[in-house]
Amino acid sequence: MTLRIAAAFTVGFLTLVASPSTAQETTAAVRPAGAAVIVRGDTLFRLTGALGPFSPEERARAIAARIDSLSRDPVGARRAITIADSGGGTNLALGSTVLMTVTDEDAAAAGVPRATLAAQLAPILQQAIGGARGSTFKGILLGALLTLLATGGFILLFRGMNRFFPWLYRKIDGWRTTIIPSIRIQRLEVLSAARAADTLVVFARGLRIAAMILLIYVYLPLVLGFFPWTADLSTTIFGWVIDPLQQAGVSFINYLPDIFTIAVIVAVVVYVLKFIHLFFNGIKRGAITFPGFYRDWAEPTYKIVRFAVLAFTAVVIVPYLPGSDSKAFQGVSVFLGVLFTFGSASAISNLVAGVVMTYMRPFQSGDRVKIAETVGDVVEKTLLVTRIRTNKNVDVTVPNAMVLSSHIINYSSSAKHRGVILHTGVTIGYDVPWRQVHQLLISAADKTEGVLAEPKAFVLQTGLDDFYVKYELNAYTDRPNAMSRTYSLLHQNIQDRFAEAGVEIMSPHYRAERDGNAVALPPAPQPRTAMDGPIAGQ
């Protein structure tokens, strides 16, 4: 049926045909200029302007082909034609398909603004597409036939799912004790076989509901698209899912170069980290040496360098992440940064203190140290804490910030080379010659296990009080980790030597009224036997 249009454009750009007989009368007088857009024998309008390398004739053929293609698609895009200015022209589009572009030359030939000309052409194109896609009796019959076929397919699929899923439920229930195993982590049963089967049944029921919803979602727009009166509604319903999926697909394709860039960066960083680990491992083993760089610095330095490389990599990769330039991403980043700053202040101070102490080297693992009031052996050093095992076999964890802010006494640092001095004191009355006291104290030190013969032990007189003289015995040892045991043995030997010499020890204070009583001395020392038991302490 011939398309009848009542408007006419000036300057020969657009000629609308009312009927074949009228067209013959007008063309006999004046032949319109430009290329005609003809769809199924009907001339819609004429084009006089070129678009880039395309001539008016090429434009006309392309527009006619697009209209014919859309009008023959019963379930294709059926939205209203949209008008959008693209800078150099005005696009008339149906969904994602651009039907034509109105140029400035077209508008000048028509004697109207470009936007006005585009608004006049939109209903003509809309009618050309909609009028041929099923308004005829033949189109209605075709839509009804397609609806019957779609309904039959819907019923078959619906009944098939109603048979398949109950069968699947029974099958899963039969696998409960045969195929489906229990999920275990070593000896811990995380999920029993019965619970796993129940979980699979619940998953199958959810899958059935999703399949039903999908089937209905596809069936309804499909049937609505068979008829011209509901085709737009069909397109709208399909667009609820198709448009987001299409946008996601386009975004993913556009994001592929960024993914490739991130993959290349990650691959390079992985091999850089492997090389760095190999380098510092060589320093740790002693295969690579640098003056002033200690081997025990290799592991913490590697961790610091690795952290710096990973942080730099994150800074480089973040701009390539999807949504990294959005306000939401930036806001979340700032929020997490504030949380990290205020929530980890103490942890960061301990971390910085651990790094500082690593290069200060105030102690090593195994050293006997005194940190604040804690005395013991260092059993572990980390970037956050230092763990000390006391003489009572108690592990004390000290934050590195506290270690750095306290005074540190290291008994082991010079013990291997010069020996550390153990010192203890006694008070002896003025009636005992000081040379004898010196000899007894040095003799006790010489007989003590753990005390070095060289350098020689020595005695200092540290005070002359009212009733006694203060003597301080100083002895060298190269076993600072056994200081408690060495002190105990030294004190035992001092008592034995003074008792053998008949000298009273007036420590710390001793009061006696001389009324003829015997001298306050212990009995003569006896050799140590197995009945005495081992000496406690370290």
Image (tube, rainbow, N blue to C red):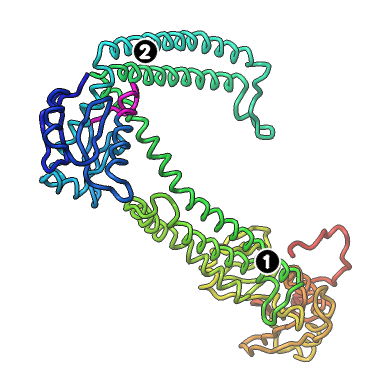
Specify the label residue 146 is tagged with: 2
**Closer to us: 12 or 88:** 12
* Quadrant where the C terminus is found in the figure: bottom right
Is residue 9 in sight in this rendering? yes
Amino acid under label 1?
Asp
Q: Residues within 10 Å of mark 1 (few under 14, many from 20)?
A: many
Depicted 382 relative to depicted 290: above or below: above
The magenta span reads: 68-80
Residue 242: x %, y % from top left: 37, 31
Residue 515: x %, y % from top left: 71, 79
For this orientation, the residue located farthest to the front is: 28
Q: Which residue is mark 1?
A: 377
Q: CA distance from mark 1 to mark 2?
A: 87 Å
**Closer to us: 214 or 4:** 4
Left or right, 324 with reference to 280:
left
* Quadrant where the N terminus is found in the figure: top left
Depicted 436 relative to depicted 396: above or below: below
Residue at 61% across / 88% down in the picture? 466
Q: Secondary structure at mark 1?
A: strand
Left or right, 171 with reference to 518:
left
Instruction: Indicate the quadrant where residue 247 lies.
Output: top left
